[in-house]
């Protein structure tokens, strides 16, 4: 089963940093949302502490296209980049819809528009439960309405869909939290 780690928990009041995560899966080492952080060491030092060099990262997934989630995508020279409509590596652009793509065993992408039309959620089966990496929630305690959402109705539909299976949420800007009755939908 895949194992997940938060390399850098994000924040969003005052300064801005994305939640940067690592997924260890069979045959793949995946970074999710290498975006804004206080310095690159906030990504690279935790990665090194887990025993990995940036060149060992095989895949990078971005939850959507905002720079606070993408600015450090080039830190991983060997990685394939995944977004909502393609994969990218060096000068190769391979178009495909993200919906249902299996990046590695137990690691699946869903298209979950709402915050932006390009949002995707990474669904990971772990021993602790189904863990989702997504910007459908900014943080656990963020007000229920995402005031930056381009399509609030779609956002609520996407949340409802994800909550059918999600047990743990890794939000865009904060530490992971367990789904509860209080989780905004
Ligand atoms: Zn955003
Ligand atoms: Zn964000």
Image (cartoon, rainbow, N blue to C red):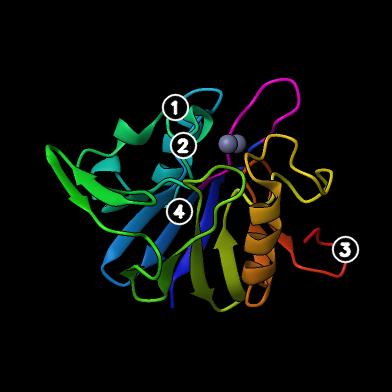
Q: Residue at x 31, y 72 (%)?
A: 26
Marks 1, 3: nearer the viewer: 3
Q: Which residue is mark 1?
A: 40
Q: Which picture quadrant has residue 90?
A: top left
Which one is in front, 128 or 163? 163
For marks 3 and 2, the one nearer the N-term is 2
Residues at badges 1 and 2 in contact (C-beta under 8 Å)?
yes
Which one is in front, 118 or 141? 118
Quadrant in which the C terminus is drawn: bottom right
Residue 76, horizontal then vertical, whole percent: 28, 39
Which one is in front, 51 or 126? 126
Marks 4, 3: nearer the viewer: 3
Q: Residue furthest left?
A: 91
**What's the magenta bit mostly, secondary-structure-wise?**
loop
* Numbered disc 1: secondary structure: loop
Q: Which residue is mark 2?
A: 43
- Could you tell whether 17 is left or right of 120 in the image? right
Report the Cα–Cα distance between label 1 and label 3: 34 Å
Residue 165, horizontal then vertical, whole percent: 63, 77
Q: Which residue is mark 3?
A: 182
Q: Magenta part of the protein: which range? A: 11-20
Q: Which mark is residue 144?
A: none
Q: Is any part of residue 161 visible from this angle?
A: yes
Report the Cα–Cα distance between label 4 and label 1: 15 Å
Q: Residue at x 64, y 55 (%)?
A: 154
């Amino acid at each position: 089963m895949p194992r997940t780690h938060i390399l850098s928990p994000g924040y969003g009041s005052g300064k801005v940093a994305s939640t940067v995560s690592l997924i260890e899966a069979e045959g793949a080492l995946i970074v999710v949302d290498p975006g804004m952080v206080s310095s690159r060491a906030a990504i690279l030092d935790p990665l090194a502490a887990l025993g990995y060099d940036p060149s060992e990262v095989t895949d990078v997934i971005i939850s959507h296209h905002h720079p606070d989630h993408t600015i450090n995508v080039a830190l991983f020279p060997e990685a394939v980049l995944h977004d909502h409509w393609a994969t990218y590596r060096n000068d190769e652009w391979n178009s495909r819809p993200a919906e249902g793509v299996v990046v590695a065993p137990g690691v699946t992408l869903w298209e979950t528009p709402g915050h932006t039309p390009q949002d995707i959620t990474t669904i990971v089966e772990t021993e602790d439960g189904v863990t989702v990496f997504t910007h459908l929630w900014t943080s656990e305690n963020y007000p229920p309405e995402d005031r930056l959402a381009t399509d609030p109705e779609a956002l609520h539909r996407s949340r409802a869909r994800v909550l059918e299976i999600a047990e743990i949420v890794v939000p865009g800007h904060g530490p992971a939290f367990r789904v509860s009755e209080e989780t905004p939908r």
